[in-house]
Amino acid sequence: MADDVTVSDNLLELSLGEHCGPGECRAACCVGGIWVDLLEVQRILDHAEVLRFFLAPQYAANEDLWFEDEDFLHADFPSGVALATRTVPRAADAAQDGCIFLRADHLCALHVASDALALGWPGLKPFECATYPIRRSEGVVAYDEETTAAHPHADCQRHGTPQRPRFLVFKTEIELAIGQKAWKTLADRAKR
């Protein structure tokens, strides 16, 4: 593993065997918005002109609406500073707020714009979104049991599928969080 990261044993636990997509859970993980590193905020704003085409019209015109004003200072973010995405009534369920970048079709405008710009993965998606439900916090990479407990449909798993270890189900997210070499070390650890 990387010297500055510990990998939680909860990644070795059995889980539902298949990763689902946002259409199945209606993007349940996007309910509360997300903290975005200041460097990622700037990258998103640098692509504002294109991103506007993929946002709801009432939010597209003014990028000052996209993020909350208050900074969050924390060492988990590369710049040490993060801003929260603004939450607004969800187009598909107005009784529930969601991230401003969440579209009525349950897709993320940042993801759709990244695909249109051929930016590759994760493109404009913030690290915390691209790795979800894998979370890197306080130097520990783990499956986010806190959010999935609060929002049961936000577990990113297809229900009714055979169980597999989480490190296999969420391989892409874990590799993004810790790298391919560290993922291989995790897989070797699981064999023991």
Image (cartoon, helix red, strand yellow):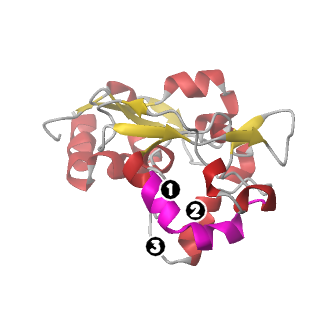
Residue where numbered disc 1 is placed: 125
Residue 132: image x %, image y %? 50, 42
Marks 3 and 1, how far apart in space?
A: 10 Å
Residue 6 horizontal side relative to residue 154, left or right = left
Q: Which mark is residue 69?
A: none
| Image point (48%, 66%), residue name | 46
Marks 1 and 2, how far apart in space?
A: 6 Å
> Considering the numbered disc 3 on the image, is that residue within a helix, a strand or a loop?
loop
Is residue 170 in sight in this rendering?
yes
Q: Which mark is residue 119?
A: 3
Residue 135: image x %, image y %? 42, 35
Residue contact between numbered discs 1 and 2, judged by CB atoms under 8 Å: yes
In the rendered view, would you say 54 is above or below 187?
A: below
Q: Which image quarter is the C terminus in?
A: top left
Is residue 124 in sight in this rendering?
no
Mark 3 or 1, nearer chain start: 3
Amino acid on which the number 3 mark rests in the picture: Leu
Q: Is residue 17 magenta?
A: no
Front one among 175 and 112: 112
Front one among 155 and 146: 146
Within-10-Å neighbours for mark 2: few <14, some 14–19, many 20+: many
Within-10-Å neighbours for mark 3: few <14, some 14–19, many 20+: few
Highlighted magenta segment, given as a residue range? 41-56
Mark 2 or 3, nearer chain start: 2
Q: Which mark is residue 111?
A: 2
Front one among 161 and 111: 111
> Considering the numbered disc 2 on the image, is that residue within a helix, a strand or a loop?
helix
Mark 1 or 2, nearer chain start: 2
Residue 6: image x %, image y %? 23, 30
Residue contact between numbered discs 2 and 3, judged by CB atoms under 8 Å: no
Amino acid on which the number 2 mark rests in the picture: His
Q: Which image quarter is the N terminus in?
A: top left
